[in-house]
Image (cartoon, rainbow, N blue to C red):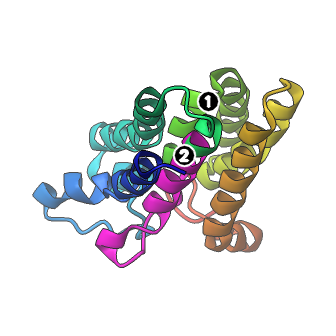
Amino acid sequence: MTITAMFCIAASYCIGAIPFGLVLSRTSGVDIRKSGSGNIGATNVARLLGKKIGVLTLLLDIAKGFLPMYLTALLIGAEPQHNLVVALCGAATVIGHMYPVYLGFKGGKGVATGLGVFLYIAPLGLLFSLGIFIIAVGLSGFVSLGSLLAAASIPVSLTLLSEPVWKIFLACFIAGMIWLKHIPNIKRLLSGTEKSWKKGKAT
């Protein structure tokens, strides 16, 4: 692997580790890590600071997944290990969001950043998973449930679309990481204490 490729992977992690939710919340005087769910992602930001800042956080976190892969693909061109490097950049940016060096490796759950990754490598498959997310959240009111089902559906949708194996492996890795980061949510869903968007409180 070339020095350029290794630089791109490292840079992808550093970009993914930028805590946009925390940065945007600083001017409000609210430490999102100590309020709500304590998560730095768009869902908690929206609950605490309003939909506008929540949507901006969402867009920036999506960009963290998309741009490193896009720019890396342009930079390395037709390098023999092109697909491997791009995939590693996608994985690195999601890991950066989940375990950011800037925050003592305590970050978000990777859903929006993962969305950015799949927006780049498989937009059609992403549409299928977004549909599942919208239906699940609409029916249940639980963003976490929608995120879990959407993440689980990504490898399936890419397989059905006959996408390259490297994309399916990347999808399995990111989906697995998202489920791992959602273990506390899974426990709350099973116990009936997860917060619902429909009621704005434990259901």
Q: Earlier in the sequence, mark 1 or mark 2?
A: 2
Disc 1, disc 2: CB below 8 Å?
yes
In the rendered image, which quarter contains the C terminus? bottom right
Magenta-span inclusion, residue 107: yes
Q: Is residue 82 left or right of residue 33?
A: right
Residue drawn at x 43%, y 67% as measured from the top left: 107
Q: Which residue is mark 1?
A: 121
Residue placed under numbered mark 2 in the picture: 90
Residue at 40% across / 46% down in the picture? 4
Q: Which residues are magenta?
A: 86-110
* Dominant secondary structure, magenta: helix
Residue 36 sits in which quadrant?
bottom left
Q: Provide residue 79's location: percent of width, then percent of height.
A: 55, 33
Which residue type does callout 1 highlight? Ile
Mark 2 Cα-neighbour bin, 10 Å: few <14, some 14–19, many ≥20: many
Report the front residue among 57 and 170.
170
Q: Secondary structure at mark 2?
A: helix
The numbered dot on residue 53 is none
Q: Residue furthest bottom?
A: 104
